[in-house]
Amino acid sequence: MPEQINTYAAAEEYINSIPRFTGKNSVEDTRRFLAHMGNPGQHSRIIHIAGTNGKGSVCAYLCSVFREAGVTAGMFTSPHLVDMRERMAVNGRIASEEEFLEAFRYVSDRLTDLPPALAEAAYHPSFFEFLFFMAMYFFDRAGVEYIVLETGLGGRLDATNAVEDKALCVITPIGYDHMEYLGDTLGEIAAEKAGIMRGGVPVVYPVQQPEATERIEACAAEAGAVCVPVSPEAIKEIKIRHKTIDFSLQFNYYEYIGFTVSTTALYQVGNAALAVRALRCLEDERLTAPIMQAGIRGMVWEARMEEILPSVYLDGAHNIDGIRAFLDTVKSQAGGGRKTLLFSMVRDKQYRTVIRELALSGQFDGFGVVQLQGERALALDTLRDTFGQYTGVPCTAYGSLREALADMVRGRGEEDRVYIVGSLYLAGEIKALLRRPGRD
């Protein structure tokens, strides 16, 4: 058990050490420990979000609208980019170091008097569970009206699924990712995500590939959930502007509401549409059309086609569907200048498929690769050589991220663009570099 931990840094170090001495626990054990904590969050309305791509963005859109309406909401997301505290926020403000430490110590103290079933199993929360428990305590202390929970992996067996009473579920687009855990087909992956559903609770989801949609609807029928599909045909009049995108969302035969997303990422239109449809399901009179319009426009989510420097765009796409959505946005951006791409990835992703898609897209005049930090990093030689297998476009291997960013940004023309993509870990390293005092 953690003892004598009195600083945020020590708490963060302990949580980072958890994977070395414990593994994944069952959802039932997670539920037992949550009950042992007194079921924090039971007085809030819980919105649970699963899916392959867009989960964090949908969470952020929901909470931006809540904030615009003056409605208190807690948001639990993962992974963090730079600071572990990013995973838990209330009304857009991440937990302070003092609040983080208080939540850590509360969870730690509960480990000293475990109920018999957990004590016999020598239970200890996993890395993800520990942060989930801390977030629920933090939200409970803040007295939030809504809690927006993003699943970490899958849905059915995810720690966040220990929460039974939900006001609403959302399933974002399904794609091929984490297949070693979730299944080899879209139907199998969709079924795992659909495990968050509850009887009588609305589930909002996009109409997408038939295999995924049909499985979601079959699981909803089995669970007794209320299906709320969002068809691509309901999203109309998409207009891409300089730094925003306008679109209209159809709710029935005669009701349309216009929205603006403050990004050039085309995939955010679908994520915003899911969030708006979900908000309507809540039947909260404070969430009026003007409030939703302002909240959707006001949402800014880091590392989602984010312009981090003039004409330098950072995107967290890290699987084949995310990369294809990223490429759709690159193709939609006007301008006759050079486009270059900085890329890296972890080795346990489908890096060869992703690199092939990027290399053969015809969108880039040059590539740069750099190795990530950590033991999961894909080797620099492998990154460079894999690009070389699919394209003759020059690919430069950089020894450090600082060198890569400085070289690719230096000397670019007025219409030139630099894109950075491949991993949220890469995005986090970029953000940390840009925040560092004295950077180039």
Image: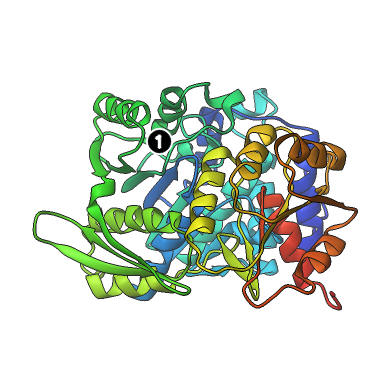
Total marks shown come to: 1
Q: Position of residue 193 (x, y in %)?
A: 44, 33
Residue depicted at 50% across the width and 53% down the height:
56
Q: What kind of residue is marked 1?
A: Ile
Please, which colouring scheme is shown? Answer: rainbow
Question: Where 263 sits versus 157, above or below?
Answer: below
Q: Position of residue 377 (x, y in %)?
A: 80, 41
Q: Quadrant of the C terminus?
A: bottom right
In the picture, residue 81 is in which quadrant? bottom right
Residue depicted at 87% across the width and 39% down the height:
381
Give whichever of 12, 63 is nearer the camera: 63
Q: Residues within 10 Å of mark 1 (few under 14, many from 20)?
A: many
Give whichever of 27, 93 is nearer the camera: 93
Residue depicted at 56% across the width and 54% down the height:
135
Q: Position of residue 113 (x, y in %)?
A: 65, 39
Question: Where 172 sits versus 61, above or below?
Answer: above
Find disc 1 in the rendering and name its residue: 196
Q: Is residue 151 left or right of residue 366?
A: left
